[in-house]
Image (cartoon, rainbow, N blue to C red):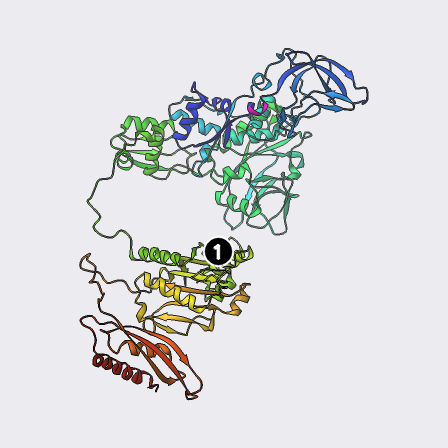
Amino acid sequence: MKFTLSWLKEHLDTDASLEEIVERLTMIGLEVEEVTNRADRLKPFKIAKVLEAEQHPNADRLRVLKVDTGQDEPVQIVCGAPNARAGLVGVLGKPGDHIPGLDITLSVGKIRDVESFGMMCSERELELSDEHDGIIDLPEDAPVGVNFAKWAGLDEPVIEIGLTPNRPDCTGVYGIARDLAAAGLGKLKERSHEQIRGNYPCPVSVSLDFGDTRPMCKAFGLRMVKGIKNGPSPKWLQDRLTAIGLRPINILVDITNYLTFDQGRPLHVFDADKVHGNLVVRRGRAGEGIDGLNGKSYELDDTVCVIADDNGIESLGGILGGEPSGCTEYTVNVLIESALWEEDDIAATGRKLGVNTDARYRFERGVDPDYMMPGLEYATRLVLDLCGGEPSETTQAGRVPDSSNIIDFPYSEIRRLSGVEVSQAEANLTLKSLGFWISGSGDTVKVAAPSWRPDIEGKADLVEEVVRILGLDRVPLTPLPRTGTVGQKVLTTGQIRRNRTRRALATRGFNEAVTWSFISKPQAELFGGGNAALELANPISPEMSDMRPSLLPGLLSAAQRNADRGFGDVALFEVGQVFQDDTPEGQKMVAAGVRRGTAKLQGASRHWSGSSTGVDVYDAKADAEAALAAIGAPVEKLQVHTDAPGTFHPGRSGCLKLGPKNALAVFGEIHPRTLADLDLEGPLVAFEIYLDVLPQPKTKGGRSKGALNASHLMPVRRDFAFLVGKDVKAEVLLKAARGAEKTLIADVTLFDIYVGQGVPDDQKSVAIDVLLQPRQKTLTDEEIDAVAKKIIANVEKATGGTLRG
């Protein structure tokens, strides 16, 4: 929202400086984003007088001017303006000056072999208006040599504030002045409530026709003014609009733009001679369209509110006027419209059609309903004053809704919610200055919000109004009371696990990625999702239509994007939520990672000591186990199963389970079919850990750590080779060996699997390394042999195999 300082003072009687106004605006919640001054870009331009104007020797339409700049000798200017003449007082730009309207910097040049030391400027060249038929022609008494912007009063500041959506009352300069007056920075000038008496009934009627559907327009006021004379706006109006970045068009259009920014009341003016029959406010119909005043065409349907006549659509209600009934310099009779539209429909139509106008900006936030007809009267007065004409009586369709909202307001709420001590008299004065109505006495009163404040709903809003006007600097600085030291851990178990997972994966060479929580439907179906309940009602794009059932689609796509840009060897991980259904229980916390190319733990890419091999399933398994170990999972008890999801390669993947059903993680190489479906290039391995499935840690009685499990005695290693059936899983054999003697066996490692000569066709040789760690004393040969016999017996019982001779 932009306005000039002089514009503000049209409504606010104040002696405050610009600095005071800017500071107070920000203090009361109307944050000032920028203060600019047109004089900054017009600073180089001076008033100059043409002393002589002779015909150019080599061009019929050019003249050679001798121009008095008020300094030194006159300068020579070549000018092609039709009004260039001796005695003209205009605006001069010298070499080195930047012409904003042309976006060029002047230099000394030759025009048809005659040197020119600058240019005499038109209004369009200085961005003062669209006038370019001739150079600026100032009064004869304009002081030569003086800065043009300062003399013309163009050096006033333009203030821009950033409005929050809950303050539609400040989309007009009058509303901003009201807030400043309430804050003690001046006195608000009463706006006109004049009612224009009509001389005849309005010949065009208006009706609201929405049938059995929900109305999209609350009320609609209309009046005709006939016999007007349209044309360029007066200078004061053009200057006011130009200062805030609007282009003056003609008086009728400029009046509507002026009221939009001055009073926050958008209106529209129809050329009455182009309207055929009466006006009907209704829903659009399929196949209908409109050519807007912005030069674009729009196709409509029944979700759009339109204003139509017997010929069809004339306007998009509350958003944009139509070209067929637009006003021109030939307009003689006009219809002035002032209406109230449904805020949600205005916002939906604007988004659907991609139309952003100043009217839409205000209507979708909510305009003052009680100012609908007064705004029509104000617009009529401006039309009569600037264009002449004869007004009709007003006609109205619909009913202006009752905007009253009575709130029971205990004064004690101010102290309770803000901590500010405010007397009842001070609170009353503040609220009344903002337009609130107060009734009653005592500690609780009834307060009615004004019609221009739709954001006021309850007593907390009233407290906010009092405090922001009196000043947030009155809120006392009160430190929070100390309640003692923190006795328990601050982070939850889930937060601790997520942090430890991130740290563990980062130490293994991964980079953390954050991907979108929604993916395309084909990707969701590929990874076990695609549930209709998880489909977004209003997706950003078709590629982001469903909530993700897995973190892997986003990470795999991110790895491919890196590869497409020359970074093929990447390791990425993410910790985030996945969605199985639309219930709270269906929202799970997962950690996942992918490795691509040669991004192994020991490093990626080529090296002088040998080229790195591509990532494989064992890299993914090691990553998953390391992350699980970091969050306290009993990795040594986990079992590897081969029932990984179909997105993984069936022979190069696995599932880590704690027991037969409790799956903690999946890992493996991505299936070639999955790579093709996602348009990816391998090799790619991945893992996914289900953080919520891990059992909660057991609470300990104190903070002391467990006893150090270390031994000063030398460990003993023994190798065993067993002949077992080819279908026997190595994990079964390892588990049996570990359970033979838990107090002495520290680790069991598989180091060889052999099939071939010397081994029966239906069997395989599995060799393991067993580490024995004594605790109390050095083991004797007899004790080692006893442990070996237990190992052999356990393995034979579990697998049906025998010790290989």
Q: Position of residue 129 (x, y in %)?
A: 63, 26
Please say if 721 is above or below 136. Answer: below
Foreground residue among 360 and 568: 568
Relative side of 279 to 64, left or right: left
Principal secondary structure, stretch drawn in magenta: helix
- Give 145 or 446, whichever is nearer the viewer: 145
Quarter where residue 461 is shown: top left
Q: Quadrant of residue 183?
A: top left
Which picture quadrant has residue 103? Answer: top right
Q: Secondary structure at mark 1?
A: loop
Residue at 25% x, 52% y is 489
Residue 5 covered by magenta stretch? no
- The residue identified by callout 1 is 537
Residue at 33% x, 33% y is 447
Q: Amino acid at mark 1?
A: Ala
Tell me if 752 is positioned left or right of 232 in this view: left
- Residue under the point 32% across and 61% down: 630
What's drawn in magenta, residue-wise?
40-44
Packing grade of label 1 (10 A; few <14, some 14-19, many >=20) is few
Picture quarter with the C terminus:
bottom left
Residue 725 at least partly seen? yes
Give the vertical position of 602 relative to 456 (above or below). below
> Of 381 and 181, which appears nearest the observer?
181
* Residue 671 position within the rendered picture, expressed as x and y whole percent measured from the top left: 50, 69
